Amino acid sequence: MAEANPNPAPAPDNSVSQDGPVTPSPSPTPDWFESLPGDLQAEGSLKNFKGKPIVELAKSLVSAQKLVGSSIRVPGKDAKDDEKVKFRETLHGHLGRPSKAEEYKATINAGKDATVDTDFVKVVHGWAYKYGVPDQGVQELFDSYVVNASKHAIDSQKQYEDAVKMAQDEWGAAAPRHLANVKRLLDTTAGPEVSDLLKKSDVANDFRVTRWLAGIAEQLGEDSLVMPISEQQVADYTRELETIVKGGKDHPYYKKEHPEHDKYVKRVYELNQAIHNPANRQTVGA
């Protein structure tokens, strides 16, 4: 039996050759998708990553976790009332609704010379808060309101100007008398509420309506368009007249240099006409 060689020859160095170092071939990288169980490979959300580096799957997972962390869970049909209220409050806050109605900043931008109805604005703020409307949505509502109101005012002014021109074209110099008769007709037959309603509506600017009312006034006659006056009103006018004429020499009625002198002279004339000449009672103001 041969003895073992105490000094065996060294193993050949295959990394070195006459042509230089030899780099060993890398082991093939296993396909991570193919290594998944069949049921996971069949998942639609994973099929999109087939053939892609696993780092793409990791990025997608991180993004999904961030989205879930900032999402709002919708309560189920069996959720308690307080859970539903909490969900609504959270949702409205995410959409831009202030935490209370008083924190709304939206307002009516009607111009520097216009008067804003602050009570109306507060009512809209309360309504918006109740129904979860964001501040930006309320501002857009106000802006739209201003645009429509301005357009309506322009249209109404043009209608009024057109109606006046048509009255002048049809009646000529008698136009002021016919228009005054229409006003007296409304005041004496329609009452202040209906009269104001017609004056504020677009119907009042329609010359066809004006012509119709002028025809009625013409048939009734101007004498029948006198404002009725009661005994109580006569008594009230008499007391007002006595207060002026018995006010003494320092009363504006007797002092020509007083800035309100002409006003009281005119008023005394109107009161005398109402008390002593019923045909002119319609000239007396309230």
Image: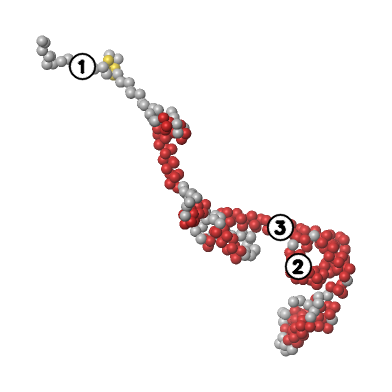
The earlier-in-sequence mark between 3 and 2 is 3
Q: Which mark is residue 11?
A: 1
Question: How far apart are the two marked residues, 1 and 3, measured between alpha carbons?
Answer: 103 Å
Q: Nearer the viewer, residue 8 or 37?
A: 37
Residue 122: x %, y % from top left: 58, 63
Rendered image quadrant of residue 18: top left
- At a point 75% along the width and 86% down the height, the residue shown is 239
- At a point 11% along the width and 10% down the height, the residue shown is 2
Mark 1 or 2: the one toward you: 2
> Identity of the amino acid at label 3?
His
The earlier-in-sequence mark between 1 and 2 is 1
Question: Circle 3 is placed at which residue position?
Answer: 152
Question: Circle 2 is placed at which residue position?
Answer: 194
Q: Is residue 118 left or right of residue 252?
A: left
Q: Nearer the viewer, residue 213 or 154?
A: 213
> Identity of the amino acid at label 2?
Val
